[in-house]
Amino acid sequence: MITKKMLILLALILIASPMLFGQTPANPTANGHWVPISAGFSMAIASGLCGLAQAKAVAAAAEGMARNPGAAAAIRFALLLGLVLIESLALYTLVIIFVKVA
Amino acid sequence: MHETELFITKLFNDNLAGLGNTLTGIVGMAPEPRPWANFVTMQLLVALILVVLFAILRPKLSADRPGKLQHTFELIYDFVREQAHEQVGHGSRKYVPYFGTIFIFILFANLIGLIPGLEAPTMVPSVPAGLALATFFYYNIMGVAENGIFKYLAHFAGPMPALAPLMIPIELVSHLARPLSLTIRLFANMYAGEQVTMVFMKLTFLLVPAVFMGLHVFVSFLQAYIFMLLTMMYVAGAVSHEH
């Protein structure tokens, strides 16, 4: 788990970064170079969280099917529906990336 | 996204450019030298394949000696009918044609991208958007046809009239989000599947792109099924009677 020290360190880095990087002369697309970087990070975060959520769904479905093999068809249906809806949340992030990164 | 012209699109653009410009002119778009886009010709190809397939199937239908084609289509029909009955309940029979069309069209449109020389029309955002809008209009029109316009609008207000000021914005937003999510889900899955295969093909030609192509086949089936399933759920929500 993230300790308090890591959080404080992260906050300091985030606060310091405009000062560190704000030394280039101002131009109309001053912070345009952040877009691909944040696109990479955001897609990674979205995919990671989607992976966690799908793992929970699959784990619950597998346990349900193990406890009650007779209900396997219904559980499989709910599992598939849930997986696709969670997947589509990660894909919304991908679409924003298409829109914003060239 | 660099779009190269497929062989079929080149045929259309070389020979039927006038027709293309007439059709786009009907909606007020300016004429351009090569009006046919890849996804338009691919959709026409999918529609042609489906029409030819059913034209071959229809004379061969027989109750005594069904052939392989009939068995395959009976499987698909039973599948769609069972799902419709499970989601919509009784009265699902009149919606089965639309559900079946959506399922088969999206399935063929997704799978046609695997053939070299052809590309999936569902890979461009316009095609899933059109399908999602068709579904949106379909379930609203079926809801109005079943319940009458006043009762249909009244069910946006929720279970109790006191909750209406809260429920109406929520229901409106969630209904408007439906075609958006249907579009993005189908488009992003198809586009990402192709891009992932391309990326791995740049890395290595051995085996790994085929694995991702196999995943893309599975995702194609799944996305066609999910689109149909969500359509059924929306129609079920729209035509349900308050008992």
Image: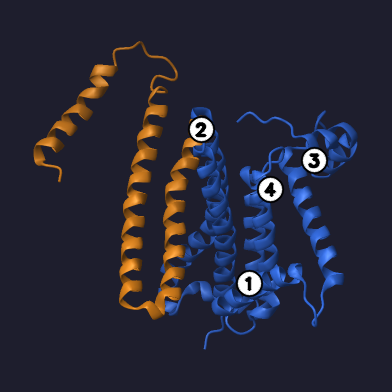
Chain colours: A orange, B blue
Q: Label 3: how many residues lie within 10 Å, few (<14), some (14-19) or many (20+)?
A: few
> What residue is rendered at 42% in x and 28% in y?
A36
Percent x, y of residue B206: 52, 34
Percent x, y of residue A73: 45, 74
Q: CA distance from mark 4 to mark 3?
A: 31 Å
Are dots 4 and 1 on a single chain?
A: yes
In the image, is B44 to the left or to the right of A81?
A: right
Q: Which residue is mark 2?
A: B199
Percent x, y of residue B68: 74, 69
Q: Amino acid at mark 1?
A: Val
Between A11 and B203, the one nearer to me in the picture: B203
> What residue is rendered at 43% in x and 51% in y?
A89
Q: Which residue is mark 1?
A: B80
* Label 2: which secondary element: helix
Q: Quadrant of residue B100?
A: bottom right
Percent x, y of residue B175: 53, 62
Question: Is A85 above or below relative to B20?
Answer: below
Q: Which residue is mark 4?
A: B112
Between B104 and B37, the one nearer to me in the picture: B104
Q: Amino acid at mark 4?
A: Ile
- The tag earlier along the polypeptide, 1 or 2, is 1
Q: CA distance from mark 4 to mark 1?
A: 21 Å
Q: Chain of mark 1?
A: B
Callout 4 touching callout 3 (CB < 8 Å)? no
Callout 1 touching callout 2 (CB < 8 Å)? no
Q: Label 1: how many residues lie within 10 Å, few (<14), some (14-19) or many (20+)?
A: many
Q: Which residue is mark 3?
A: B28
Q: Chain of mark 4?
A: B
- The tag earlier along the polypeptide, 3 or 1, is 3
Q: Amino acid at mark 2?
A: Val
Q: CA distance from mark 3 to mark 1?
A: 39 Å
Q: CA distance from mark 2 to mark 4?
A: 20 Å
